[in-house]
Image: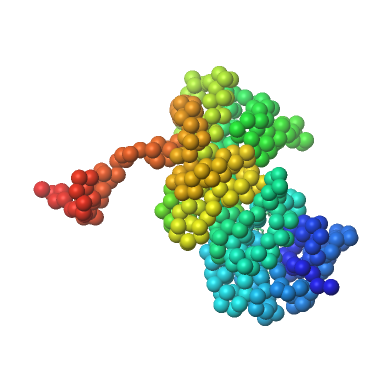
Amino acid sequence: NKSQIGVIGLAVMGKNLAFNMANHGYAVAVYNRSEEKTKQLLAEAAGRQLTGAYSLQELVASLERPRKILIMVKAGSPVDTTIEQLLPYLEQGDILIDGGNSFYQDTIRRHQQLAAQGIHFIGTGVSGGEEGALKGPAIMPGGDPQAYALVQPIFEAIAAKVGEDACCTYIGSDGAGHFVKMVHNGIEYADMQLICEAYILLKELLGLKPEEIKGIFAGWNQGELNSYLIEITADILGKIDPATGKPMVEVILDKAGQKGTGKWTSQVALDLGVPIPSITTAVFERYLSAMKDERVAAAKRLTGPEAHSVRKPAAFAEAIRRALYVSKIGAYAQGFSLMAGASRQYGWNLDLGSIAMIFRGGCIIRAQFLNKIKKAYDKDQGLPSLFLDEYFRTSIENYQKDWREVVVAAIQAGIPVPAFTSSLSYFDSYRAAELPANLLQAQRDYFGAHTFERNDKEGTFHHNWEA
Ligand code: NBP
């Protein structure tokens, strides 16, 4: 009996996806470079249709045709190595699926190389971490639609569900799926940074303790901010360190790590010329946080304003909630405009409403709010910015007074809120009919004869600034 799908790479993600598929009744063959992981998985397989293979040749031979093979190895060169080692055993029409966090340009390259050899390639984003992989991830597949049709039933079976809907939709050709997963992670960076800024404002401006902030976040989770990240933040803030009896959050060193997907999102945005300041700021804040020793030394020498003079009453928490909500709208507006920009650049024809729906389940950024994004794109597929949708426009109209007050209060108190500020500046720049770029163009023309356009005549002009 042949297996219906193979999985290569049995670290946390591959193992859990294999179990997820087997739990849905699929016969799965599994392979890992080092044998222990395969043996370990089989030892836990109890009654499921999981078959171990101890060479790639054996794996390929154990699969029904056309073969479907999910590669879940570390992103980067291990994916290329695995593909190279597999190729001698594959036949025309077989389907390779890369479910790791591969860079989308690698996916475009692999897609082209494999297409030339008659092998289909599906690059798919898989979101939701270890638990999502087992219980239902969000899946963002890109590649040949005909090949995708053959794996679609498996993907939809194992994906997270919101009501009846599977959080899995074909995204677009070649690298589209990995691109969307990358932007998902970029948005996640901004979302997390914004929540951290709300936390530090509640702590510093209102003088609240973690236990009190927990209650506030738990309350926020009942309203329009309802989301996985707000929910876990409330949970985190209630945890106590067994060793010291202190709140867990207060014994954790303030140095952020990262695996690079936020950085990629920012680099790509720079390449495509799409502004995503809140996301990029969130990446930079992680770098700044990592400069712990330098910050500690600087804190001894550099002074800010007298913080106590701007202590706010408890009611100010509602203003912070509103500022967080509209800052979040700004970050999502940026992420979605990046996807729109890439869609134009690569001809992916991305359906941004469906993408918002996939993010709704399984993903780290899952949130009620994504329904509003879906509705916005349902009403207008070509919406230039989420800001222009009626719901988001009205939310900002209602909350922007608080947004500005919160940012001003933070600045006066010397509390860094770079993502709140970036979102607000982005909003103010986006809605400005006039920006000072007229002066900038004059400067460029002055020192470099770079020319400029005029607002009263067609054409390109150079002025003799020395005259
Ligand atoms: P890792 O990213 O930690 O990779 C470990 C796996 O890659 C092991 O199976 C390892 O085999 C295999 N591998 C390596 Br390393 N080099 C190899 C090579 N040259 N040839 C063959 N196999 C090789 O695993 P993971 O955390 O399960 O993630 C898998 C993918 O999913 C990654 O792209 C990751 O970014 C992505 N992802 C992870 C998460 C998450 O929450 N962890 C979430 C979403 C996406 P070995 O056992 O022989 O060393």
> Looking at the picture, does residue 401 appear above or below residue 353?
above
Q: How is the image coloured?
A: rainbow
Is residue 126 shown left or right of residue 180? right
Spot occupied by residue 39 in the image (x, y as percentages of width and height): 83, 65
- Residue 461, given in percent of the width and then of the height, sits at 19, 53
Relative depth, front residue between 296 and 36? 36
Q: Residue at point 53% right, 20% down? A: 312
Looking at the image, which residue sits at the far left? 467
Q: Point out the image quarter for the N terminus.
A: bottom right
Percent of width and height locating residue 366: 64, 43
* Residue drawn at x 33%, y 39% as measured from the top left: 433
Please tell me in which quarter of the rendered image ligand 1 is found.
Answer: bottom right
Q: How many marks?
A: 0
Which residue is depicted at the point 59% across and 38% down?
Answer: 369
| Camera sees residue 333 | no
Q: Of all residues shown, which one is farthest toward the right?
A: 47
Which residue is more in the foreground, 58 or 114? 114
Q: Nearer the viewer, residue 120 or 198?
A: 120
Quarter-wise, where is residue 227 in the image? top right
Quick check: 344 left or right of 110?
A: left
Vertical position of residue 394 compared to residue 94: above or below: above
Q: Quadrant of residue 190?
A: top right
The picture places residue 440, in percent across and down from the top left corner, at 28, 46
Seen at 77% across and 56% down, the residue is 20
